[in-house]
Amino acid sequence: MNPNDLKIESRNLIGGQWVGAADGGAFPVTDPATDRVVAQVPLCGAAETRQAIEAAQAAGPDWRSRTAAERGDLLRALADLMLRDRERLARLMTLEQGKPISESRGEIAYAASFLSWAAEEGKRLYGETIPAGHRDKRILILRQSIGVVAAITPWNFPSAMITRKLGPALACGNTFIVKPAEQTPLSAIALGELAQQAGLPPGVINIITGDPRAIGGEIFGNTAVRKVSFTGSTEVGKVLMRQAADHVVRLSLELGGHAPFIVFEDADIDAAVAGAMASKFRNTGQTCVCANRFFVHESVYGKFAAGLARAMASLRVGAGFDESVQIGPLIDDDAVAKVQSHVSDALDRGAKVRTGGNLVSVGAGFANRFFAPTLIDGLSADMRIGREETFGPVAPLRAFTSDDEAIALANDSPYGLAAYFYTRDASRLMRVAEALEYGIVGANDGLPSIAQAPFGGVKQSGFGREGGRHVMHEYTSVKYISWGLGPA
Ligand code: ADP
């Protein structure tokens, strides 16, 4: 399939209608590999967002009155349509996001899995009874839907970051509006089309593209919105948290990470290299759980670094539609500037580049946005790369001598999303897993994300969990009924 043949819907979905911005405004979506404009999408603001919120509110009573099985059937139908259209959706994703096509195919299946998981989990929103404190009373606990849920999502997983909010939000009986990232609105809009085909009622899912501040302002200013789920930067997360204070809006925040990756002296080095490759280079290093700091025991440093360098040398850099490519373009020029500045700052502070370190040209007609997989020796905490998320294909290494030192280095961060380590010692595995101040720990595993497990961070990586049964708490309220029986 030629990407140019993709039938691209680019309007917004409000109350079951496909609409543009009220004033006809639009903004371009570009292919990060070529800078080619692939679509224009509506540049909406507060007024359209208000309409979307009203549509979601209007759809609420019918949606929440349906049985969990009825809602589950519709979510599963949407998941099935995503899998039916996997190739088309994957191509759309690579077109607007740049990731290698095999990763886009993987993301569509991953995204659909959150819908089918939630479809089933919604059937298990059990209440409770609690032994009462009085003979003539009973205590009942219900878990109820919250109301209108708004999602604000990032560009790095244009489909999965929506479905892992959408699935549980809808399964719990809420209705939904989403503002996708301005870089990747087309994957969101394509989901909306499939939602209509699946038979989801008008207003249950609404999609708004446009000005983040104006849309966010209406979301937090409109008392009909009872819950906001955000995935994005810690910086924006803090802004939203302040805005949420005005109406005490419930929040889930999946923010930045700065994942440590520890290799102990007893690790299976081949497995550690494979895990490092999976964790570091997924989505060209642009995920919030990408390993960004490697701490390697001094006795295995040489072996691990050589193995990683060898594996990195086999990565092919190029445009995502080339089936042989594993490293695509960075999302935009700001991303390139950040990666470059992290590398040059590390070199200024004494680090050495072992491989890569620069942009590479992938041919005529392509943007200058392809960064070589880069291995750096001599990471230290005073470097920007030692403190901040790089969001690019750069792996900085540092040697350590003791477990305590490795744990202290790993925990020396304001972030606490994902951490990884490799060891074959079961006692060490449990001790280290417990000591790491992170929400997700990959113990001999470089790819822990999956629909049935709770994903989320501690510290400035945010709060709330997505996936697993835990996510259902994010989209329900607990109601306590104190039931007085009166005289017998
Ligand atoms: P990234 O650094 O990954 O681009 P951002 O935090 O900037 O992450 O963006 C994540 C999402 O948050 C995007 O959909 C973006 O449009 C949105 N966003 C950015 N700033 C605001 C804001 N002030 N209010 C609401 N949404 C915002």
Image (cartoon, rainbow, N blue to C red):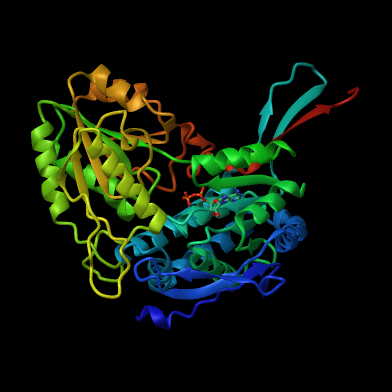
- Residue 485 rendering spot, x and y as whole percentages: 85, 26
Q: Quadrant location of residue 421? A: top left
In this rendering, position of residue 483 left or right of residue 30? right
Q: Looking at the picture, how far across and down is residue 191, in whole percent?
A: 53, 66
- Residue 369 sits in quarter: bottom left
Q: As drawn, which residue projects farthest toward the bottom?
A: 5
Nearest the viewer among 450 and 274 is 274
User: Which residue is drawn at the image coordinates 26% and 25% (left, top)?
Assistant: 429
At horizontal 24% and vertical 42% (from top left) the residue drawn is 395
Image-based side of 146 in relation to 335, left or right: right
For the point 25% across and 75% down, the residue is 364
Q: Position of residue 103 (x, y in %)?
A: 33, 60
Q: Residue furthest right?
A: 487
| The C terminus - image quarter | top right
For residue 100, side relative to residue 458 (left or right): left
Residue 469, visible in the rendered structure = no
Q: Residue at x 62, y 44 (%)?
A: 475
Residue 152 in picture, x, y percent from top left: 57, 52
Pick the front one: 276 or 76: 276
Residue closest to the eye, 55 or 331: 331
